[in-house]
């Protein structure tokens, strides 16, 4: 079973407004009925658990143009390897010497199990 939050049933005795029930509490006699407001479970908003993602970014081919006359000459660097681990040196490629922003980034997102 899932968790259920506030009730969305409009009640005629409240002029069509909700009764203010903020949580579904299962009745021990009828598990589909709320102990607080007496409404069916379907009138309560179902709370979905948050989805956890694992994102991996890999910086690949360098796209920095080194020949401005012809605008088509790149250096051939195929993978970003940082010079250091922290600070500004982490943004400089050890292979071609350019900034990480010139390298193509491939983002992989996976849903992790809870």
Image (cartoon, rainbow, N blue to C red):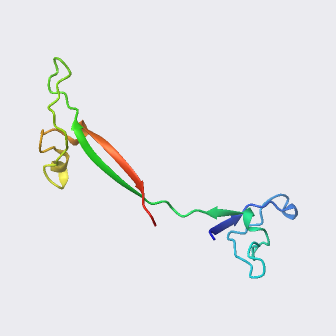
Which residue is farthest top?
69
Seen at 77% across and 68% down, the residue is 40
Observer-nearest of 56 and 20: 56
80 w.r.t. 43: above or below:
above
Seen at 12% across and 45% down, the residue is 94
Relative image position of residue 49 (x, y in whole percent):
54, 64
Left/right of residue 75 with respect to residue 109 in the rendered view: left
Quarter holding residue 75: top left
Seen at 20% across and 31% down, the residue is 64
Quadrant that contains the N terminus = bottom right
Relative image position of residue 79 (x, y in whole percent):
19, 43
25 w.r.t. 17: above or below:
below
Seen at 85% across and 59% down, the residue is 15
Left/right of residue 64 with respect to residue 31 in the rendered view: left
Left/right of residue 89 with respect to residue 18 in the rendered view: left
Quarter holding residue 19: bottom right
Marks counted in the figure total: 0
Relative image position of residue 67 (x, y in whole percent):
14, 23
Which residue is farthest bottom?
28
105 w.r.t. 76: above or below:
below
Observer-nearest of 8 and 62: 62
Quarter holding residue 13: bottom right
């Amino acid at each position: 079973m899932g968790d259920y939050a506030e009730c969305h049933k409009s009640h005629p005795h409240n002029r069509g407004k909700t009764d203010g029930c903020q949580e579904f509490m299962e009745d021990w006699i009828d598990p589909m009925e709320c102990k607080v407001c007496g409404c069916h479970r379907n009138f309560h908003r179902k709370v979905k658990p948050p989805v956890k993602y694992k994102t991996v970014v890999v910086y690949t081919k360098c796209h920095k143009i080194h020949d401005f006359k012809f605008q088509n000459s790149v250096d051939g660097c195929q993978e970003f390897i940082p010079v250091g681990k922290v600070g500004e040196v982490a943004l400089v490629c050890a292979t071609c010497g350019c900034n990480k922003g010139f390298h193509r980034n491939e983002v992989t997102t996976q849903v992790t199990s809870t």
